[in-house]
Image (cartoon, coloured by chain):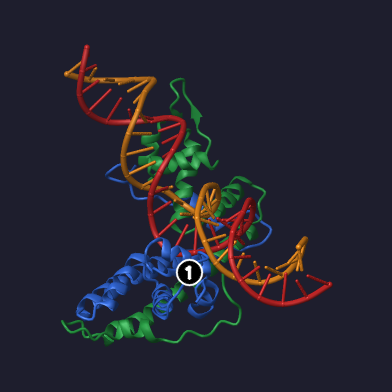
Chain colours: A blue, B green, C orange, D red
Amino acid sequence: MNIGDVATRSGLPSKTIRYYEDIGLVKPLRSANGYRTFRDSDVHKLAFLGRARALGFSIEDCRSLIKLYEDTGRESAEVKHIAEEHLTRIDSKIAELAEMRATLATLVHACAGDDRPDCPILADLASKQQGARLTKPG
Amino acid sequence: MNIGDVATRSGLPSKTIRYYEDIGLVKPLRSANGYRTFRDSDVHKLAFLGRARALGFSIEDCRSLIKLYEDTGRESAEVKHIAEEHLTRIDSKIAELAEMRATLATLVHACAGDDRPDCPILADLASKQQGARLTKPG
DNA sequence: CATAAGGGTTCCCCTGACTGGAAGGTCAAT
DNA sequence: ATTGACCTTCCAGTCAGGGGAACCCTTATG
């Protein structure tokens, strides 16, 4: 199967599939004219990758997951561990965004949003004290 | 003031401050030895940038916000508009993450996480049907 | 036979917002 | 004179691809 068909079936753009070959996630064959030739197992693997990526797993996580998937002697604990770590990262990200959202919503609510210059949003950004750092950054 | 002191006071790494000069967000003076020399107004602006970035505003948003901040004839509606759009983006991101989280949590919960190979997480990634695309991607 | 359309190929640059590191100049203190 | 802590510029890398150029392959059509 050529890359275009694989793109349609796996739901991944051709560019992405080439990139995945580049970084060694799939290894399609090549036909005489130089075109990539994908087996069913390649298509399957790409679909797997697409779903893992849709759940937000990093490429490196995907690499591990594929390896575990292909290792019939795996322990599900390993898979679960990867998923749990990812879940934790997602939770952190959500918490971070929720905090931003809360602050921002308060500011937006406080701003008249009319033709006058007075703006609590700018006032907040300009004036809020930032905790002094004990160790110098950079 | 030299960059190290500014870093301490603004809470931004020196690297970031140099980068902000690079992209025209701040324009510190230069002393005879080539060192950047920051005025109070520069430090103030950098702190403003740091807080806007902490709220998740993009650099381009920051550029607009700084411009509005410095324009005493601004209309608060413009500021509010930027903030509202950002708020919408944050909400989308949170929704996306929440959906991932829900799926992932279900899978993690279903996985025994022991020494056996059976794994609902891998099974899900491997088998779930993806809606057929009507238009070919990539 | 020429050519056009619609595949495919490689290659390199671009994204955002920095971060890391090398090679070297400056300054204060020892 | 030399250390060490600053500072400078410049280049490369991050993550996960996207855009587009320049070119090859295959099939259909005039």
Tell me: residue D4, above or below residue B100.
Answer: above
Disc 1 target residue: A31
Question: Residue B97 falls in which quadrant of the image?
Answer: bottom left
Residue A53, horizontal then vertical, whole percent: 41, 72
Residue at 43% across, 56% down = B54
Toward the viewer: B70 or C15?
C15
Question: Residue B14 falls in which quadrant of the image?
Answer: top left
Residue at 24% across, 77% down = A71
Tell me: residue B77, above or below residue B38.
Answer: below
Give the chain of mark 1. A
Q: In this figure, what is the number of numbered marks?
A: 1
If the image is split into quadrants, where does the C terminus of chain B sit? bottom right
Q: Is residue A61 visible?
A: yes
Residue B17, horizontal then vertical, whole percent: 44, 41
Residue B28, horizontal then vertical, whole percent: 50, 33
Tell me: residue A61, above or below residue B17.
Answer: below
- Left or right of D27 in this view: B22: left
Helix, strand or loop at disc 1?
Answer: loop
What crowding class fits label 1: few (fewer than 14 Cα within 10 Å), some (14-19), or many (20 or more)?
few
Toward the viewer: D19 or B78?
D19
If the image is split into quadrants, where does the N terminus of chain B sit? top left
Tell me: residue C28, above or below residue A10.
Answer: above
Residue B80, horizontal then vertical, whole percent: 59, 61
Going by the numbered disc 1, the residue's amino acid type is: Ser
Toward the viewer: A2 or B132?
A2
Q: Is residue A110 visible?
A: no
